[in-house]
C-alpha cells in the first residue's frame, strides 16, 4: 500500500484544500493528513476559527482522507514519515523546497496552489462585509 502524507491547518475548509487533498491522494492509496493543533497554530502565528477537534472531524469526513493525525511542532515530520511508513510527502508549492530534507525518507512533491482562495482571504472578505453592513 502506497502511503501519502500532507500537513496543514485546514481552517474554514475551501476548494483549495480539497484540490490539494484530491491530488495528494492520487500519489498513492492511503492519505494521512497531519492537522495543526491549536497550540502549533499559535507557533505558526495563526489562530484558526475552528478548534483542532472540529478541523480533525471535518477532514475525516473527506473521501480522499484516510487518517488524520495531530501536528504539534515543526520537528515531527521525519518521525511521522518513518513511523507511518510513508512513501510520498505532498504540500502546496508555497512550501516549495522547505521540506526537501524529507527526500532521504520519502518522495517529496510540491503541488501548485489553487489561485484566488485562502482562509485569510475568506476572513478578510467576511470582515469587510460586516463593516459595510
Ligand atoms: N493550499 C492550496 N491552495 C490554496 C490554499 C491552500 O493548495 N488556495 C494548500 C497549502 O499549500 C497546504 C494545504 O492546502 O498544502 C493546507 O493549507 P493551510 O491550512 O494554509 O496549511 P499551512 O498553514 O500552510 O500549514 O507543517 C506545515 C504546515 O502545517 C502547513
Image (cartoon, helix red, strand yellow):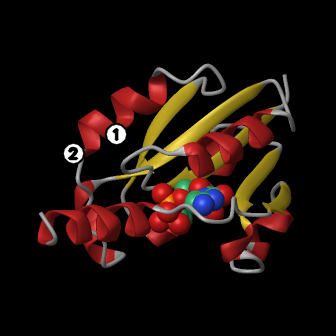
Q: Nearer the viewer, residue 28 or 114?
A: 114
Please identify the quadrant where the N terminus is shown.
top right
Identify which residue is drawn at 60% across, 23% down: 66
Q: Nearer the viewer, residue 5 or 111?
A: 111
- Secondary structure at numbered mark 1: helix
Q: Is residue 120 left or right of residue 42?
A: right
Identify which residue is drawn at 67% across, 74% down: 95
**Label 1 C-beta lies within 8 Å of the nearest ligand 1 atom:** no
In terms of image quadrants, where is residue 122?
bottom left
In terms of image quadrants, where is residue 96?
bottom right
Identify which residue is drawn at 23% across, 53% down: 49
Residue at the extreme front: 133
Instruction: State the CA–CA distance, disc 2 to disc 1.
Output: 6 Å
- Secondary structure at numbered mark 2: loop
Q: Nearer the viewer, residue 14 or 74?
A: 14
Q: Is residue 133 left or right of residue 108?
A: left
Vertical position of residue 71 compared to residue 21: above or below: below
Identify which residue is drawn at 67% across, 49% down: 81
Give the residue pinned by disc 1.
Answer: 55
Please identify the quadrant where the C terminus is shown.
bottom left
Give the residue pinned by disc 2.
Answer: 51
Coordinates of residue 102 in the picture (x, y in percent)? 76, 66
Q: Is residue 102 left or right of residue 62?
A: right
Circles 2 and 1: CB atoms closer than 8 Å: yes
Instruction: Estimate how packed mark 1 is, as few (under 14), some (14 to 19) or many (20 or more) residues with alpha carbons within 10 Å.
Output: many
Coordinates of residue 40 in the picture (x, y in percent)? 31, 65
Instruction: Estimate how packed mark 2 is, as few (under 14), some (14 to 19) or many (20 or more) residues with alpha carbons within 10 Å.
Output: some
Coordinates of residue 105 in the picture (x, y in percent)? 81, 58
Q: Is residue 74 in view from this perspective? A: yes
Q: Is residue 129 left or right of residue 8?
A: left
Coordinates of residue 61 in the picture (x, y in percent)? 47, 20
Q: Quadrant of ligand 1?
A: bottom right
Amino acid at each position: 500500500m502506497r502511503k501519502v502524507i500532507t500537513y496543514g491547518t485546514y481552517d474554514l475548509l475551501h476548494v483549495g484544500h480539497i484540490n490539494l487533498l484530491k491530488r495528494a491522494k492520487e500519489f498513492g492509496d492511503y492519505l494521512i493528513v497531519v492537522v495543526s493543533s491549536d497550540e502549533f497554530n499559535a507557533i505558526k502565528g495563526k489562530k484558526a476559527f475552528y478548534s483542532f477537534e472540529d478541523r480533525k472531524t471535518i477532514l475525516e469526513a473527506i473521501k480522499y482522507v484516510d487518517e488524520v493525525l495531530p501536528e504539534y511542532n515543526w520537528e515531527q515530520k521525519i518521525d511521522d514519515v518513518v513511523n507511518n511508513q510513508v512513501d510520498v510527502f505532498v504540500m502546496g508549492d508555497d512550501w516549495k523546497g522547505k521540506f526537501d530534507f524529507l527526500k532521504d525518507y520519502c518522495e517529496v512533491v510540491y503541488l501548485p496552489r489553487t489561485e484566488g482562495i485562502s482562509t485569510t482571504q475568506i476572513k478578510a472578505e467576511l470582515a469587510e462585509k460586516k463593516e459595510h453592513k
